[in-house]
């Protein structure tokens, strides 16, 4: 397993938010190495996307994956790559190392940079397995001892092909935007570890881990992530992701428009709330007299569904709960 002296690198191309399979490589490298380089593989100008590197850095920070050196850009090391190629020429084993314009290709840049940065283990996706023999031979031809290569399974879509970047939850950014807490994404990737074979993407598993991750957040942290005051936290606890939690917070913080609701139910609820009954007691009593809980929920939140009614009552200041009941009475 992880060796303290292992030196690893995560080497994304700057094409925008990380594919979940690339994020798997990042987490696997971090878990393996004592020292990690973040290297931007920008050898192919056609694939470089404006803001692509910033998106990757934001993804890694969000996932809590830290690195020790970098970001180092391969494009800034072209002189060194050309100099290294002098020993073997512009082509090697039938593969182009230097293009017509003298710029180094991925294979040359990767092998030289892995050597120069003292990389001991290269951990990357199975799609690079075909490159292993070439990279090892090229390293030796250039006078370097090749690192150890480990290739992990890819993350597949429902169709059994490599997950499309457009598929739901396929990029780190899309998970973040879906309200998945970072801990859940990270936990999923750590669970996968270094899969020997390709695996099907399990977004349902991430969603279950999201529920656990939210449950583990202290009140203040949950409130901060939602951008709401800590007083609303009771109403956020049943939310399955941060977007749902934000939605629940809005229900508490914004008074609904008054609704048509059972006056008997609202009158009874009003009595109980004004009398200082605890939230659970209010719900129990209204239910006991055959009251219409849907009416009470509508009056308090304007919605048919949402957090538990007692949680809504716990999150609303008493005067505000009374105002909302009165508005619909
Ligand atoms: N830029 C390559 C990729 O993202 C890196 C492959 C490697 O790790 O050597 O697939």
Image (tube, helix red, strand yellow):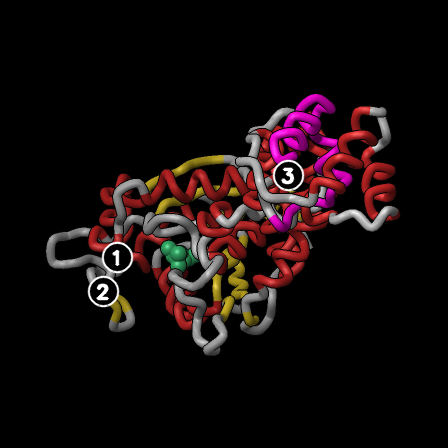
Q: SS for tag 3?
A: helix
Residue 142: % across, % down: 35, 56
Q: Choose top left, top right, bottom left or bottom right for residue 197.
A: bottom right
Residue under label 3, please give it.
299
What residue do we see at 74% from left, 34% from top?
313
Residue 124: % across, % down: 49, 60
Report ligand 1 position as a quadrant. Answer: bottom left
Q: Is residue 306 magenta?
A: yes
Find the magenta span and give its range: 304-329
- Check residue 105 in the rendering and tell me which mark sits there, or answer none: 1
Asked whether the viewer can see residue 280, the reply is yes
- Check residue 96 in the rendering and tell me which mark sits there, or answer none: 2
Question: Looking at this view, is 55 or 36 the one in front?
Answer: 55
Q: Which residue appears farthest toward the top when viewing the image?
A: 319
Mark 3 or mark 2, earlier in chain = 2
Mark 1 or mark 2, earlier in chain = 2
Q: Is residue 305 magenta?
A: yes
Q: CA distance from mark 1 to mark 2?
A: 7 Å
What residue do we see at 85% from left, 25% from top?
275
Q: Nearer the viewer, mark 3 or mark 2?
A: 3
């Amino acid at each position: 397993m992880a060796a303290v002296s292992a030196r690893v690198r995560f080497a994304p191309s700057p094409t925008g938010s990380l594919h979940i399979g690339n994020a798997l490589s990042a987490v696997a490298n971090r878990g393996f190495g004592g020292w990690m380089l973040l290297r931007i593989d920008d050898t192919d100008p056609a694939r470089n996307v404006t803001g692509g590197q910033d998106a990757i850095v934001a993804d890694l920070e969000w996932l809590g994956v830290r690195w020790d050196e970098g970001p180092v850009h391969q494009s800034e090391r072209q002189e060194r790559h050309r100099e290294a190629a002098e020993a073997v020429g512009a082509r090697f084993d039938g593969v182009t190392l230097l293009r017509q314009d003298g710029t180094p290709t991925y294979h040359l840049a990767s092998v030289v940079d892995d050597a120069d940065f003292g990389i001991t283990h290269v951990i990357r996706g199975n799609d690079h397995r075909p490159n292993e023999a070439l990279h090892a031979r090229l390293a030796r031809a250039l006078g370097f001892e090749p690192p150890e290569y480990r290739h992990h399974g890819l993350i597949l879509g429902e169709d059994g092909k490599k997950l499309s970047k457009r598929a739901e939850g396929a990029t780190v950014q899309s998970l973040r935007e879906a309200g998945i807490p970072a801990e859940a994404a990270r936990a999923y990737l750590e669970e996968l570890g270094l899969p020997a074979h390709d695996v099907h993407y399990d977004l349902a598993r991430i969603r279950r881990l999201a529920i656990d991750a939210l449950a583990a957040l202290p009140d203040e942290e949950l409130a901060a992530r939602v951008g709401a005051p800590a007083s609303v936290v009771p109403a956020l606890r049943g939310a399955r992701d941060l977007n749902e939690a934000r939605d629940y917070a809005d229900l508490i913080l914004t008074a609904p428009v008054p609704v048509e609701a059972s006056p008997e139910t609202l009158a009874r609820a009003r009595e109980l709330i004004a009398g200082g009954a605890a939230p659970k007691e209010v719900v129990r009593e209204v239910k006991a007299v055959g009251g219409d809980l849907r009416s009470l929920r509508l009056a308090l939140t304007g919605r048919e569904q949402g957090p538990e009614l007692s949680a809504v009552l716990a999150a609303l200041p008493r005067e505000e709960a009374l105002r909302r009941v009165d508005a619909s009475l």
